[in-house]
Amino acid sequence: MAQKPAQKALGPIRRSFAPWLDPSAVPLIRFEKVVKKFGDFTAVDDVSLDIHQREFFSLLGPSGCGKTTLMRMLAGFEQPTSGRILLAGQDLAGTPPYRRPVNMMFQSYALFPHMTVEQNVGFGLKQDGLPKPEIADRVKEMLKLVKLEPFATRKPHQLSGGQRQRVALARSLAKRPKVLLLDEPLGALDKKLREETQFELMDLQMELGLTFLIVTHDQEEAMTVSDRIGVMNHGKLVQVATPGDIYEQPNCRYVADFIGNINLFEGTVAGSGGGEVRISGEDPAGDFVAASDAGLEAGAKVTLAVRPEKMRISIEAPPADARNVLKGEVWDIAYMGDWTVVLVKIDGSEKVVRVSRANMTRTEAQPIAWDDRVHVWFAPDAGVVLTS
Amino acid sequence: MTRGLSPFNIVSLTFGFAFLYLPIVLLVIYSFNDSQLVTVWGGFSTRWYVSLFHNQQLLEAAWVTIRVGVVSATLATVLGTLAALTLVRMGRFRGRTLFSGMVYAPLVMPEVITGLSMLLLFVAIGLDRGFVTLTLAHITFSMCFVAVVVQSRLLSFDRSLEEAALDLGCTPARTFFVITLPIIAPAIVSGWMLAFTLSIDDLVISQFTTGPGATTLPMRIYSSVRLGVKPEINAICSILIAIVTTGVIIASIATKRAEAERLKAERAAAAGR
């Protein structure tokens, strides 16, 4: 997996924190050519990945892409078919789950139904044989952290979904693990609560200085919480990068398409030079110019990927120096409040291009309406040229 | 939906309940009959209950029944639970189908055949018939019922609970005792009760496998009925009915209470407080 450092500062969330760019940094977790097969099915296919201390790392992918299996191998519930997993330099092979310094928060929360909230949170500490007063103190501290002190003596079935989620979190944090694994931690919560909890998780991770590895299929969640995201598909790790890079510099069609919305234009390279590449479009949509310093040979098949918000749209003709201009008819309009998404059917083509505009004013002199004839254009550096 | 019952409903309901419960009601009424003859009413009396407690044979039989029931139900529960765990947890091992077939065979085997084959076995290995053989036979046929009950609970058991325990540093053996067992306990308890009920109720297999000095209550009742029904039998049956009824009522009240408690708690949780 070629993972080049970001050329441009694309708004990293925490500028100062990027140990993965430092070649001398020693990763906390290292997956080395890990393969996991279930019979004939390859769940995890040759994954190598370094995760650093204090990192908030997301494994993102559709269901069945192997992300959960990868996490379960780190927790010790599955053994790799081949390859090694190292934690702080130590090979974890042969270490059973109950001796690994990692803790997991389960998708179903897996709260012990016959124990109170207190007993659930203190369970791990009790297994370590800690003295009772110390357990009580730590449990109290954990419950305070997740704001569940008044519920200490309740049983799990007496709690709401959000409260259960926080108990599960407190329980997995109580032992102060080196790494906290979160398996779809917020899947069962409603949207608003989920967003709130995402920020709580980030704060908690910063506060405790722990390493978090989260598995999710929700790209928005991954973008919000992570320092870096690893996108998985069919057992392979497709791209590992910061949320900004994943969004702005996808390395293949799959990642571009999976994260957010994107317009894809197929074509072949017609020529290049001066940091630009000319692409002759396959579709009648036309020819394009895109910024690219990769030495692309003429005739190579490429895909030009342009995010909807990086496209411009207007009824009047675009400025004279505008490039990559397309003409079409408004097909659909979706008003989302903060954004308006306009779908434009390009003339002489089946292609429908998605353009989104920030609604920066409350009223508009000449709003775009259904069936309007419009111009759509984008700058050469707005799109990414993808070769795979 | 408060519709009145039509005359047809009332009639069929009356006949239905009468068919089910009239014999039992008659039996209870005749247990208070003063007459020696079971079917002729001779006035109210509790003398059969009194004489019952002086009937050493019947009391002894009752005591044997309870001992066999408790011992066989307990052992059947342990074995049945282990069998269920093996079937659910061990995955696809060699001979799994054979094993599951053998566990469940007594469920469908005619009692006469089970009884006879056990008798032949005990004779062949020279084991004297009595309390031990009776208990062994009861364990054999009640174990599969426990296995069925426990297996169905285990199938719906969320394995991530055990994984969570392991993840928090609990060894597999400890996990079984502090997580798995407490959670499946209700199924194990009902398995035990089922086994106990089957044991105290059994007649056919007991007939084959028992020996002198180990006569159970059903056997005693059955043999005394063959010599002519004495009102004493009515009395003991009434007592059994009273015990069973009380048990059922207590169990249903407990279930209802627990259910109400759970609903209340859930509503409180949903309200967020």
Image (spheres, coloured by chain):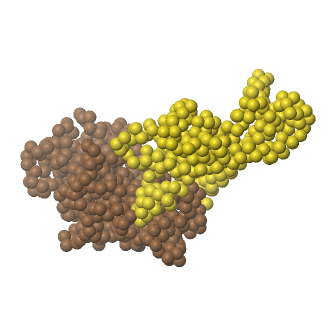
Foreground of the two, A354 or B214: B214
Tell me which residue sits at (22%, 57%) in the image. A83
Query: Which of the 4 quarters of the picture holds residue B199?
Result: top right
Q: Which sits in the foreground, B188 or A300?
A: B188
User: Is residue A7 among the parts visible in the rendering?
Assistant: yes
* Point 34% across, 42% down: residue: B94
Q: Which residue is nearer to you in this view: A56 or A291? A: A56
Relative placement, left or right, of B230 versus B269 is right
Residue B182: % across, % down: 54, 56
Total of numbered circles in the picture? Answer: 0
Instruction: Name the residue located 57 percent from the left edge and 55 percent from the top edge.
Output: A157
Residue A52: name its quadrant: bottom left
Q: Residue visible at 35% across and 44% down? A: B93
Compared to residue B225, the image places residue A127 above or below, namely below
Percent coordinates x, y for residue A274 in the rendering: 10, 56
Q: Position of residue A302 (x, y in %)?
A: 16, 46
The image quadrant that residue B38 belongs to is top right
Q: Extreme top residue here?
A: B8
Quick check: can you spot residue A199?
no
Q: Is residue A179 left or right of residue B16?
A: left
Name the residue at the right extreme.
B43
Look at the image and give the colour of chain B.
yellow
Left or right of B243? Residue B191 is left
**Quadrant housing the N terminus of chain A:** bottom left
Relative to A18, is A116 on the left or the right? right
Placement of B188 over or under B179, stated as above or below: above
- Residue B53's x, y, as percent? 80, 47
- In the rendered image of this protein, which colour is used for chain A? brown
